[in-house]
Amino acid sequence: MSTATVPSTASTPSPGSAPAPSLLRLTRVELRKTSDTRAGFWLLLVVGLTTVAAVALLLFAGDEQDRTLANFFAITQLPISLLLPVLGILLVTSEWSQRTAMTTFALVPARSRVLTAKVLAATVLGVLGVAAAAVASALGALLTPVLTSHSADWSLSGAQVGQVLVAQVVTVLVGVAFGMLLLSSPLAIVLYFVLPTVVTVVSNTVGSLTWMRDWLDLGTTLAPMYDGTLDGQGWAQVATSLALWGVVPLVAGWVRIERSEIG
Amino acid sequence: MISVEHLTKRYGAQLAVSDVSFSCAPGTVTGFLGPNGAGKSTTLRALCGLTLPTTGTATIGGRRYRELPNAGRHIGVLLDAGAQHAGRTGREALTLSAMVLGVAPRRVDEVLEQVGLAGKPAGKRVGKYSLGMRQRLGLASALLGDPQVLVLDEPANGLDPEGIFWMRGLLRGFADRGGTVLLSSHLLREVEAVADRLVVIAGGRIVAQGGSEELLAGTGTLVRARDRGALAAALAAAGIGATAGSADSLVADGTAEAVGLAAARSGVPLLELRPAGGDRLEELFRSLTGPSAGGAPTATAPQIQETRA
């Protein structure tokens, strides 16, 4: 506690000479932030456990002919697509609810660099989620002949892997976009789940609004991607629904954070 | 080197900070004083790029904060001790900052040691910290990048007397090695022992600034009589200006000799006659922070600047 241990500051170089933190470093920091709090740790753990549970469910309770690697892979995406966006939301909103934005932006005054790092970190989380699902699915396929009378089916199309990756990354980024727009954990999480559900219910109930379900309901447009069966028009429908739920809130939130007052 | 020039910040119709200018030189500690809501935090946030000023500039070493590529290596900032995630440990919060700054991980242990949080407290979650511990963590975070400039908003808040004494020594040492320190407070007593310069803000305007010795010394004479009205009349008759001091005293614009003679001439017996010391600044401060200050600190400000000059 003695002040004599303070390193001398007189000889340090003039302002502006220390290099800015690289985007890679900032992304690593953001990734670390998702897991170094109790909430983040438990959320990640729950994602892992539900993924394993999904495999177990199909293994022991599913139809025999469904116990294929492709099916395991598809079903494990469900808990991940449900929970990872929450992690994406918290990646942004915790900075405001825990007031760390002040510390974060005082260290990195170029706010868009922090936001870019958050988007990159969320992308990595999406990819890691798919990787975890793949491991759990492989485990399921491996155990199928051991625990059941069914033989293992290891077929898995490249299209399915690729489309699942895109779908999961998109889903996490929609969470990040909601977080950026609303800057409040409870508000962003509730609206993230409620608003799309409302759109789904309304467009399924009102006969004249089926175009809404086909073009604006992200849950509906992304669904074929989990089996790798998205086709030409499907991509266009993913694009329009993503524009509504992802791009618009992301851009609006980004601009607002750039201009807003912190603290 | 901190330089704030003609800084104005307006929120809608409300003027939070108006034409604030001051500078802080290397090797000095500047106390930024003012009542709560006077515009201290707004000024400091504008300096640190967290608030965009309506007009005016704030620079560190000639550059705006937002232009500093790795800001924490040049300027250590503690604006709010509560700005840490309650779910992280103190060490983890510093480790994240150290990663951003690009300093060696051992710096985390060094600053933890320096602020007295090494060992067990470092592993506790910030949510379990007392306010004093959070202030120490905030200070550790500010020191992490080995900066040349420190900007601290109410750093003594929540510290015990021993902690305040310790922090004074730390800031003094930092300035004596050529560092620049700007710290705000709403308590004069908290900063007068460590500050070389004082900048006093009230109602968003600078109402006094200068060397703390010069400001605290004052120029007047404190005088007290049983009958304050008669004393005031005696001084007025002798052409000596006076303002109300603490308790029932007056602070007169004259030497002790002149004041004593004036009182004797009018036959007013004195109870006390001495140099006013820092009472003027304290009075100024009390008038700004006291309950009587109300919502019109700007009304008292010009008058106080006159008496100072």
Image: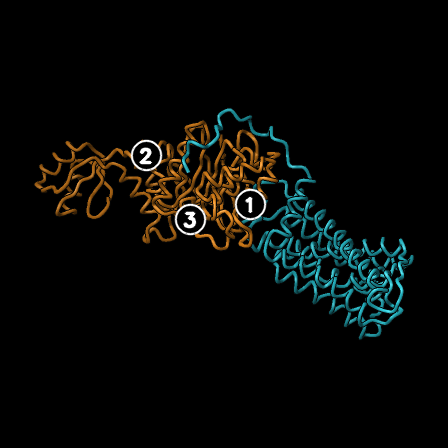
Chain colours: A cyan, B orange
How far across and how far down the image is residue B208, in percent? 37, 37
Mark 1 surroundings: few (<14), some (14-19) or many (≥20) residues within 10 A: many
Q: Is circle 2 on the same chain as circle 1? A: no
Quarter of the image for residue A74 reads bottom right
- Residue occupied by mark 2: B215
Closer to us: B23 or B194: B194
Query: What separation in Å lies between label 3 and label 2 (alpha carbons)?
Result: 30 Å
Residue drawn at point x = 67 percent, y = 52 percent: A253
Query: What kind of residue is marked 3?
Result: Gly
Along the line of sight, the residue nearer the viewer: A95 or A43: A43
**Residue at the extreme front:** A146
Residue B14 in the image, given as x and y percentages of width and height = 49, 50
- Which residue position is annotated with label 1? A103
Residue A217 visible within the image: no
Mark 1 is on which residue type?
Answer: Thr
Inspect the image, locate mark 2, and give the three-letter code of the amino acid beneath it: Leu
Q: Regarding mark 3 in the picture, which secondary structure is present there?
A: helix
Q: Which residue is mark 3?
A: B132
Q: Identify the mark nearer the N-term, 3 or 2.
A: 3
Element on which disc 1 rests: helix
